[in-house]
C-alpha cells in the first residue's frame, strides 16, 4: 500500500488537482476552502465520536453479549478498515462534497449514485436523531434535574425526555451550521480536543482502578445464548451492534473536501487517523471499564452502562466531570453528523436530484454555506424524534436502523468500485493514496463485510426490534420494512419523476468541461 505525494503548492493556497476533480465531475468551485488538517481529522473523529458511541451503547453490548462482547470491537474495526481503505483511494481521487453520493455515482452510474445518496441522506437524518438521544443516557445521571418529564420511573419517561433533550441539541446544530463551516469547525475542533483529552484521562483513571485481569473479564458471557440455535454466537452477533454503531462516518473528512485545503492529500490521512484513533482509544476505554468495575455481575452494567462504571469506580465528582465531557462529545458528534448531511443534500440538489434542487443547493453569499439543507435536516431529525416520543424501545430501534442504512450506503460505493476493479477501469489518482495490488482483495473484503453486517444488524430479532409486548411480526421485521419502504418509495420517485430532470444545475456547472475521453457531467436539466 502506498500513499506517495509529489511536491505541490503550499496547502495555504490549495491544490489545483482538487479543483480539477470538481471540474471532471462537472462542478465549479463555490464553497470557501478554509479547513486545515486538524479540522478534517476532527470532523471524522467527531462523527465517529468515541465517547458518544461507547457511552451510549456499552449497556447494549453487555446486556446482549456480556463482557465478552468486547471482542466485537476489533472485529468491527477490521471490517470497517477495509471500507475505509477503499474510501481513501476515492477521497484522493474525488475530494468532493457529499462524498458517498458522488462516489457511488462515479463508480456505478447515476441510478446507483442516487440510491446510495438517498440511503445515506435518510440514514444521516436518522443518525442525527439517534445521536441526539444520547443526551438522555448521560445528563439525567449527572443530575436528576435534567429529567424534565416524569421522574424516570414511568414506562415512557425516558423516551419522552430523550425527545425533548434531543430536540434542543438538534436546534443548536441547525443554528451553528447555518452560520457557516468556519464556526462549525471551531466548535467541532474544540470539542474534539476536549473529547480526546478526556478519553485519555479516563483510560488512565480506569487503569488505576483495575480489579481483575482480561482473562476473566473478556471471557465472561453471563450464560447468554443458552437455548439459541447459534448459542453464544447469536448473542455475540446481536451485541456487535454496540461496536458497529461507533466506527462509521469516517467519510466525513472527504465530504468536506470542497471546503478543505489540499483535501486530496489530507482527506485519506484524516479518514485512517480518525478510524484508528477511535479503535485504539475506544477499545481501551471499554477494556479498562470491564477490568475496573467493582462488580462484573452488576445488573446496572446492562442498564446504565459506562455511566454506571464511571460513577461507581471514580466517584461522583470525577465521574460527573467525565460525563460532562461525554456531553460535549455528544454535542460535537451531532454537529458533525448534521454537517455531513448538509453537504450530501447540497451535492444531490446541485445535480437537480432532489425536489426544489435549486433552493437546496443555493449557497449563502455571506456565510458561503447551504443554509436551507441545514434547516430541512434539522426539522426532519426533530420529527423522527417526536414520532417515537412514546416508544420505550426508541434507543435500540432508531440506532439499529441508522447503522444498517449507513452500511447499505457504503455498499453502494464499494460494490460498484469492485466491479470497476474487476473490469480494469479503476485508476487511483496519480501520486496520491493508492492500495496498489492490495486494492482488489481489500475491496472484496469490504463488500463481504458490508453485506454480512447489514444482514446481521437487520435480522428480525424480537429482543432488539420488539422486546416488549405487544408483539407483532411487523415490529420484529421493522428494519427490513422501514428500509424497504424508504429505498423502494424513494427510488420509485426518482425513476418516474426526478431522473427526467437530473443534471448539474446551470448555476453550479463548471465552465471548463472535462477533456476528451473523460466521463463528463450528466446532461443538463430538461
Image (cartoon, rainbow, N blue to C red):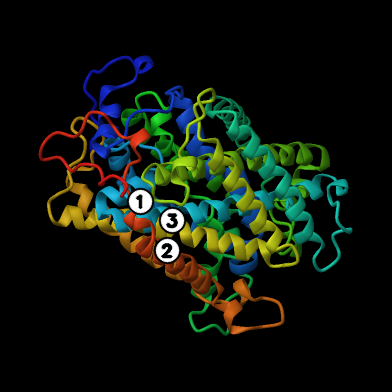
Horizontal arrangement in the rendering, residue 310 relative to residue 522 (left or right): right
Task: Left or right? Give the position of 433 relative to 220.
Answer: left
Q: Position of residue 120 (x, y in %)?
A: 45, 53
Label 3 sits on residue? 118
Q: Which residue is mark 2?
A: 493
Label 1: which residue? Answer: 83
Mark 3: few/some/many CA within 10 Å (<14, 14-19, 20+): many
Disc 3 vs disc 2: which is toward the camera? 2
Q: Are marks 3 and 2 in contact (CB under 8 Å)?
A: no
- In this rendered view, identify the residue nearer to me: 511 or 103: 511
Q: Gap between marks 2 and 1, in whole Å?
A: 29 Å
Of all residues, the one furthest to the front in this rendering is 526
Snapshot quadrant of residue 427: top left
Marks 3 and 2 sit apart, C-alpha to C-alpha, by: 11 Å
Q: Quadrant of residue 3?
A: top left
Name the residue rendered at 30%, 28% in the picture: 18
Residue 474 picture location, percent across and down: 58, 80
Query: Which dot, 2 or 1, sits closer to the camera?
Result: 2
Mark 1, other Cα within 10 Å: few <14 / some 14–19 / many ≥20: many
Instruction: Where is residue 95? Give x, y as percent.
Output: 34, 35
Residue at image point 41% right, 60% down: 408
- Of badges 3 and 1, nearer the viewer stands 3
Of the residues under marks 2 and 1, which one precedes in the sequence? 1
Q: Residue at x 50, y 45 (%)?
A: 341
**Residue name at image x 14 percent, y 33 percent:** 515
Amino acid at each position: 500500500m502506498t500513499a506517495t505525494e509529489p511536491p505541490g503548492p503550499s496547502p495555504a493556497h490549495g491544490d489545483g488537482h482538487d479543483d480539477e476533480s470538481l471540474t471532471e465531475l462537472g462542478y465549479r468551485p463555490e464553497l470557501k476552502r478554509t479547513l486545515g488538517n486538524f479540522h478534517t481529522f476532527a470532523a471524522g473523529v467527531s462523527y465517529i465520536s468515541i465517547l458518544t458511541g461507547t457511552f451510549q451503547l456499552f449497556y447494549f453490548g453487555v446486556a446482549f453479549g456480556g463482557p465478552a462482547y468486547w471482542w466485537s470491537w476489533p472485529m468491527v474495526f477490521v471490517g470497517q478498515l477495509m471500507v475505509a481503505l477503499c474510501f481513501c483511494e476515492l477521497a484522493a481521487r474525488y475530494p468532493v462534497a457529499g462524498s458517498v453520493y458522488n462516489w457511488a455515482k462515479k463508480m456505478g452510474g447515476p441510478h446507483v449514485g442516487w440510491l446510495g445518496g438517498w440511503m445515506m441522506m435518510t440514514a444521516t437524518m436518522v443518525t442525527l436523531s439517534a445521536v441526539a438521544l444520547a443526551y438522555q443516557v448521560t445528563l439525567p445521571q449527572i443530575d436528576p434535574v435534567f429529567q424534565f418529564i416524569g421522574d424516570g420511573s414511568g414506562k415512557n419517561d425516558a423516551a419522552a425526555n430523550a425527545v425533548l433533550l434531543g430536540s434542543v441539541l438538534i436546534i443548536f446544530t441547525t443554528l451553528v451550521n447555518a452560520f457557516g463551516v468556519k464556526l462549525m469547525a471551531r466548535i467541532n475542533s474544540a470539542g474534539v480536543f476536549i473529547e480526546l483529552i478526556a478519553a485519555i484521562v479516563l483510560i488512565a483513571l480506569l487503569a488505576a482502578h483495575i480489579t481483575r485481569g482480561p482473562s476473566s473479564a473478556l471471557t465472561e458471557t453471563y450464560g447468554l445464548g443458552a437455548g439459541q440455535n447459534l448459542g453464544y454466537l447469536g448473542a455475540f452477533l446481536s451485541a456487535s451492534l454496540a461496536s458497529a454503531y461507533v466506527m462509521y462516518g469516517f467519510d466525513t473528512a472527504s465530504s468536506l473536501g470542497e471546503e478543505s485545503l489540499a483535501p486530496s492529500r489530507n482527506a485519506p490521512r484524516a479518514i485512517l487517523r480518525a478510524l484508528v484513533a477511535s479503535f485504539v482509544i475506544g477499545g481501551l476505554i471499554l477494556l479498562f471499564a470491564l477490568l475496573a468495575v467493582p462488580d462484573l455481575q452488576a445488573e446496572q452494567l446492562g442498564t446504565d452502562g459506562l455511566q454506571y462504571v464511571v460513577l461507581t469506580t471514580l466517584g461522583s465528582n470525577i465521574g460527573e466531570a467525565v460525563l460532562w465531557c461525554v456531553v460535549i462529545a455528544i454535542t460535537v458528534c451531532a454537529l458533525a453528523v448534521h454537517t455531513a448531511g448538509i453537504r450530501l443534500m447540497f451535492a444531490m440538489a446541485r445535480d437537480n436530484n432532489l425536489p426544489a434542487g435549486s433552493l437546496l443547493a443555493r449557497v449563502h453569499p455571506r456565510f458561503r454555506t447551504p443554509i436551507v439543507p441545514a434547516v430541512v435536516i434539522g426539522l426532519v431529525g426533530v420529527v423522527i424524534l417526536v414520532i417515537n416520543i412514546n416508544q420505550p424501545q426508541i434507543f435500540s430501534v432508531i440506532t439499529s436502523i441508522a447503522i444498517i442504512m449507513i452500511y447499505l450506503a457504503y455498499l453502494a460505493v464499494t460494490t460498484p468500485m469492485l466491479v470497476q476493479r474487476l473490469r480494469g477501469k479503476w485508476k487511483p489518482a496519480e501520486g496520491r493514496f493508492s492500495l496498489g495490488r492490495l486494492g482488489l482483495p481489500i475491496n472484496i473484503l469490504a463488500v463481504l463485510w458490508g453485506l454480512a453486517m447489514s444482514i446481521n444488524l437487520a435480522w428480525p430479532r424480537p429482543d432488539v426490534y420488539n422486546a416488549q409486548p405487544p408483539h407483532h411480526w411487523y415490529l420484529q421485521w421493522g428494519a427490513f420494512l422501514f428500509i424497504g419502504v424508504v429505498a423502494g418509495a424513494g427510488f420509485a420517485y426518482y425513476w418516474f419523476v426526478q431522473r427526467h430532470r437530473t443534471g448539474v444545475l446551470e448555476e453550479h456547472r463548471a465552465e471548463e468541461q472535462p477533456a476528451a475521453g473523460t466521463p463528463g457531467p450528466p446532461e443538463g436539466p430538461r
